Amino acid sequence: MFDTDILIHTQVMTRHIEMLDALFKHATEGIVVVDKQANIVMLNPKAKELFGYTDRELIGRKVETLIPQRFNRNHVGYRDEYLEAPRARGMGHMMDLFARRKDGSEFPVEVSLSPFKTSDGEFVVSFVIDITERKKQESRIIEANLEIQKLNAELEERVQQRTEELAAAIKRIEQSQEEVVRALTKERELNNMKSQFVTIASHEFRTPLATILSSASLIGRYARTEDEEKRQKHVQRIKSTVTNLTEILNDFLSIGKLEEGRIHAIPVLTDLNEFCKNLIEEIKGLCKEGQQMNFTYEGEAHAWLDKQLLRNVLFNLLSNAIKYSEMGKSIFLRIKNWGGLIRIEVQDQGIGIPEKDQGHIFDRFFRAHNAGNAQGTGLGLNIVQNYIELMGGTVRFQSEVNTGTTFFVELPNREPIKIDS
């Protein structure tokens, strides 16, 4: 019986050793183990891949071998201090860390340290992550922000130039009262356009840019390997917010394209149920505290639709429902796809649209009088109406102040006729 217990214990220990060995060999982070004297005693395949060394070239060498030479002198003091009282922690809080490959090239990294003891003594295991791609993404975000600032500056310069031209025109025709009045009216219109753009930029760009800055800052705090999920969450927030900024700019471009007749509906066979579920997941991030998105779908799963136009329509209606509803309220998306006709309802429990404004709600740049400080360009519903008409559909709504608004959209579901060339 005693021998059987020993055998079982041995088998369990063997399995544990095999599992630990597999984790070490197949880890996606570089793992470097050093002893109390900062000598490298072990590294996994990922670490060898990151640094370009073999076991023979690194085992027994100081850990400074993997650090850029310009940092070596200071690093010796830091690691000696750490080895005196080692503890699990991340490295490089509020600063950038770099590692050095065998060929001398450098790359940005995140490093976390964990001390442990064995019968052979005390050791520290370092987990090393190459964050080159993340740094590139952060650079792209900064470049995008700079480009937006450049566009704003150019527009301001153009408005200023136009205002100066109008002032000169007024001076030339000051002998004619009628001409002066027309010029002043035109100047006021341009100033209104300028104010409107400043307002739009202030409301529509400030929040997304603040979100990007917040997420970029929080990413730097998650230095541990187990924080990867949190890091990815904020990376996704940054990507989503940059996409939203792009969509705001696209609103302005869409108006021009619609007027020029350069936008056309191109239906493709779409899993409409799955399409809507994905859109709901995407837009949930915009919800206020306690708001709930309720989605119901009836009928055939697939439909012939222009996915991009439909996405813009639903995204606009749902984001408006969120924007104009208080915290804790519910938003409903109901879809019925039967007999070649798609019926869509987007209902909120928000502030509603005053009756006197309802006749203008699809007008360009129009915003209801009770919209208050809610962000908006006044273009969304105008674009929604145009897109729905391009898809051969109709849109209408019912609304009551302080009760809510429901938009009703009907779209045809039919395969496009193929024309032989």
Image: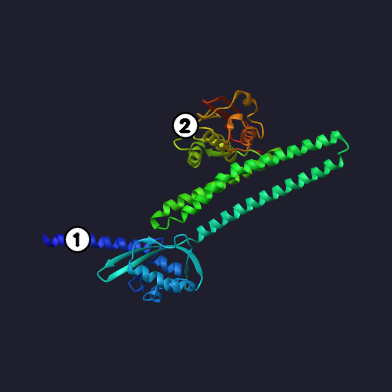
Between residue 101 and residue 405, name the one nearer to us.
Answer: 405
Q: Is residue 353 left or right of residue 89?
A: right
2 and 1 marks in contact (CB < 8 Å): no
Give, as a three-letter code, the residue at label 2: Lys
Q: Is residue 337 above or below residue 263?
A: above
Q: Residue at x 63, y 41 (%)?
A: 200
Q: Is residue 263 positioned above or below 136 on the image?
A: above
Determine which residue is flagged by label 1.
9
Identify the element where label 1 is drawn.
helix
Q: Is residue 119 left or right of residue 267?
A: left
Question: Is residue 385 toward the left or the right of residue 238 in the image?
Answer: right
Location of mark 2 (residue): 329
Q: Which percent across, then down, holds residue 240?
A: 53, 47
Placement of 35 over or under 236, stated as above or below = below
x, y percentage for residue 41? Answer: 34, 72
Q: Nearer the viewer, residue 220 or 330?
A: 220
Mark 2 burial class by Cα count in 10 Å: few <14, some 14-19, many 20+: some
In the structure shown, which secondary structural element does the residue marked by tag 2 occupy? loop
Which quadrant would the C terminus be assigned to in this image?
top right
Q: Nearer the viewer, mark 2 or mark 1?
A: 2
Q: Position of residue 399 (x, y in %)?
A: 56, 25
Identify the residue at horizontal 83%, vertical 42% (top origin): 169
Query: In this rendering, does residue 382 appear at all?
Result: yes
What's the residue type where badge 1 is placed? Answer: His
For the N terminus, the image quarter is bottom left
Residue 241: x and y in percent read 54, 46
Cα separation between marks 2 and 1: 58 Å
* The one of 396 and 77 positioned closer to us in this rendering: 77
Q: Residue furthest left?
A: 1
Q: Is residue 152 above or below residue 93?
A: above
Nearer to me, 217 or 346: 217
